[in-house]
Image (cartoon, grey):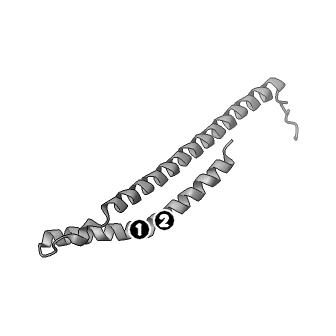
Amino acid sequence: MLGETIIEPKTDDLKELSEKLEMINLQFAQRKITRRKILHWLLISLCIIIVIIFAVLAVLNSPYLGWDYSDPETAVLGVAFHALEWLFARLAPVILITAAIGIFLIRRHMP
């Protein structure tokens, strides 16, 4: 302003800059799509794993109920197995429903 000369940017410089910015924007968009796909498949895998574990627990039908708990090692193992089964039965449905909702929401926003 006060006696300084202002250098006008050349059209080629602006075009070059806009091409670089466009390339960076495309890379960010591609990363976002890749992350969504990975998250989508991770949630699907989580649902499948939960269903498989439920099936295994159903087939086993709580075998620890028939164990002889007079042996301390068997008693500890039986209690641990029961605690695992109890905790899984309480948490897995919540995780399964949350993962299913996540799959639906991610699927809805995928291109």
Q: At which x and y percent is residue 41?
A: 52, 45
Report whether 71 appears left or right of 10.
Answer: left
- Quadrant of residue 21 within the rendered picture: top right
Three-letter code for the amino acid on which mark 2 is drawn:
Pro
Q: Which residue is mark 1?
A: 89
Q: At which x and y percent is residue 100?
A: 56, 57
Of residue 37 and residue 12, the one placed in the foreground of this image is 37
Quadrant (top left/top right/bottom left/bottom right) for the N terminus: top right
Examine the rendered structure and indicate whether residue 77 appears above or below residue 45. below
Of residue 9 and residue 39, the one placed in the foreground of this image is 39
Q: At which x and y percent is residue 82?
A: 30, 70
Q: Residues within 10 Å of mark 1 (few under 14, many from 20)?
A: few
Q: At which x and y percent is residue 53?
A: 38, 57
Which disc number belongs to residue 93? Answer: 2
Q: Residues within 10 Å of mark 2 (few under 14, many from 20)?
A: some
Of residue 65 and residue 36, the one placed in the foreground of this image is 65
**Judging from the image, what secondary structure is the residue with disc 2 in?**
helix
Examine the rendered structure and indicate whether residue 15 appears above or below residue 41. above
Report whether 65 appears left or right of 47.
Answer: left
- Quadrant of residue 37 within the rendered picture: top right
Examine the rendered structure and indicate whether residue 93 appears above or below residue 43. below
Of residue 20 and residue 67, the one placed in the foreground of this image is 67
Identify the residue at image location x=85%, y=36%: 4
Three-letter code for the amino acid on which mark 1 is drawn:
Ala
Q: CA distance from mark 1 to mark 2?
A: 7 Å
Q: Residue furthest bottom?
A: 70
Q: Residue furthest top?
A: 12
